Image: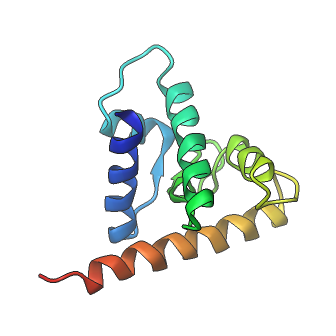
Amino acid sequence: MLNERLRQTLMDLAQTGTLTTYKDLANRLGLVPPGTIHRIGEALETLMKDDVAAGRPMLAALCVSRMQPGIPARGFFSAAHVLGVFSGEPTGLEACAFHATELWRVLSFYGNQRRSSPE
């Protein structure tokens, strides 16, 4: 159930071009401590697996770190590496370029869904 709510929340954010932090995402989903960030991280990794398997852009790219504004935490890059879609260091220019590309894919894919849906 968390994964379904997470996917819908991220799809809604993608349609408006909005990034979120892990903490904000946990709050949006109504998670309460302890372990909220850990649960979000695990759910995001599951979402990444599903997105890669389905050939979709990874919605998890919308979730960025408060500590490194504008870029996801290291776990995003580690999971992407395990999934075979990223092969660089989880910090630095390679990570920034990969994230920027994936973010563009997400915003293009989900933004187009909104524009193409009947109003």
- In the displayed image of the protein, which residue is found farthest to the left? 119
Residue at 80% in and 57% down = 84
To which quarter of the image does residue 53 belong?
Answer: bottom right
Q: x%, y% of residue 78?
A: 77, 45
Residue 25 at least partly seen:
yes
Residue at 34% in and 78% down = 113
- In the displayed image of the protein, which residue is found farthest to the top? 34
Q: Nearer the viewer, residue 55 or 98?
A: 55
Taking the image as shown, residue 67 lies to the left or right of residue 87, namely left
Q: Quadrant of the C terminus?
A: bottom left
- In the displayed image of the protein, which residue is found farthest to the right? 88
Residue at 56% in and 76% down = 104
Q: Nearer the viewer, residue 13 or 116?
A: 116
Q: Is residue 89 above or below residue 35?
A: below
Q: How many marks?
A: 0
Taking the image as shown, residue 67 lies to the left or right of residue 107, namely right
Residue at 56% in and 26% down = 38
Q: x%, y% of residue 15?
A: 34, 70
Residue 66 at least partly seen:
no
Q: x%, y% of residue 99?
A: 67, 64
Q: x%, y% of residue 5?
A: 33, 42
Colour scheme of the picture: rainbow
To which quarter of the image does residue 23 belong?
Answer: top left
Q: Nearer the viewer, residue 76 or 51?
A: 51
Q: Quadrant of the N terminus?
A: top left
